[in-house]
Amino acid sequence: MKKPRILSLLTVFFCSLVLTVSCNQTTPESTNTTSPKSYDASEIIIGYSNWAGWWPWAIAESEGLFAKNGANVKLRWFDGYLESMQAFAAGKIDGNCQTLNDTISFADSSVDGQVAVLVNDNSAGNDKIIVTKDINKIEDLKDKKVAVEEGVVDDFLLTLALQEKGMSRDDVRIVNLETGAAAAAFATGQVDAVGAFPPFWLTALEREGSKELVSSKDFPGAIPDLLVVSQRLIDEQPDQVQALINTWFDTLDFMDKNPEKSDEIMAKRANVTVEQLQLFKEGTKMFTIEDNLEAFREGDNMKHMPFAAKKMSKFMLDVGFIESEPDLTKIMDDRFVKAYAEANIDVQN
């Protein structure tokens, strides 16, 4: 990874050319999603990518918290979010950090099953649709070029925003690019709008007159960010899944007690400055154990994932993101957060 800095527009222009060509290719730091596993089968491989709610995993690795909790885990960083999901669905890794809607999208195509076992956070403004200065409302996007990583989280946000105004994706001209390339394309004037998550919307906002049109803050509960593991891992090594959950909450505790060191580790992993990191914190609601218990419960609003999953699944069917609805009862398992809660807090049922 390069040293942290916001790219100049000239540099972004050249980067956009490279990224546009190579957005479906791996980098030396990324995983080859087509090759067999080359590591010890007993080692648990968890994928993660550039999202504020997942950067804390780097703290767990740096501070030895996996080992402390008996988790035989190796983290694998992916430069492309879509690539991480493809690797997980293909059985090349044992778990991945991804959103609820994307878990639904990949559920039926996953060789070992996909099960959400932890809510890391909710996006509360960090997913954004950035537009040019002449676009002031959703309706102004009609017939405009919008760059998004098609079929994943900010495409979903875009579609929610369009639907709210009685529009659809057919009303705009979708330009399918990996999120980093999409932000670069917008910054250099190749498209009229972009859907992006951190840190890529920093690049998008370098374009003169650019601004945020809508964000995940406008759709509370629509984008829960999760730790998702394979059903095979749950069946064969449930103790390791529990160790992962325990590690996560130890990590949050470490962040509370060591904020400066935590910020340094996360900023390095995200390839941003510590100052830029603070911008991303504002749009990320980290979930406590109490938040997790609520999220996994049945309910009648988007705060409850069983409810949200049904809404998302129907929505994705309607707009053609998926061909059939997966068995939603199989994509969530709250036993591990419940076990953590029972061991660490007084739970009132």
Image (cartoon, rainbow, N blue to C red):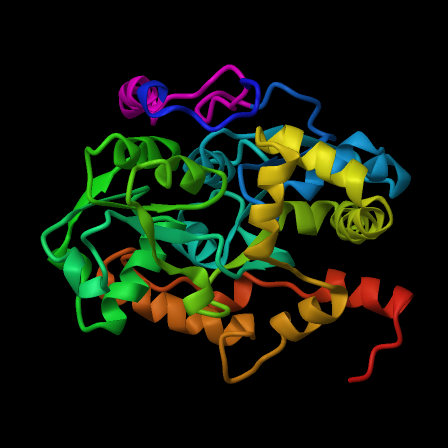
The image position of residue 260, as x and y in percent, is 79, 40
Q: Is residue 57 left or right of residue 321?
A: right
Whether 17 is drawn above or below 335: the answer is above
Q: Magenta segment: does it hold 31? A: yes
Q: Is residue 346 visible?
A: yes
Q: Which residues are magenta?
A: 12-36
Q: Is residue 58 visible?
A: no
The image position of residue 269, as x and y in percent, is 63, 30
Q: Is residue 237 left or right of residue 183?
A: right
Q: Quadrant of the C terminus?
A: bottom right
Residue furthest out toward the left: 143
> Residue at (34%, 24%) from the top-left corner?
12
Whether 115 is drawn above or below 43: the answer is below
Q: Quadrant of the N terminus?
A: top right
In this view, the residue in front, 175 or 90, is: 175
> Residue at (44%, 39%) from the top-left corner?
202
Whether 22 is drawn above or below 213: the answer is above
The image position of residue 68, as x and y in percent, is 90, 39
Q: Is residue 320 left or right of residue 1?
A: left
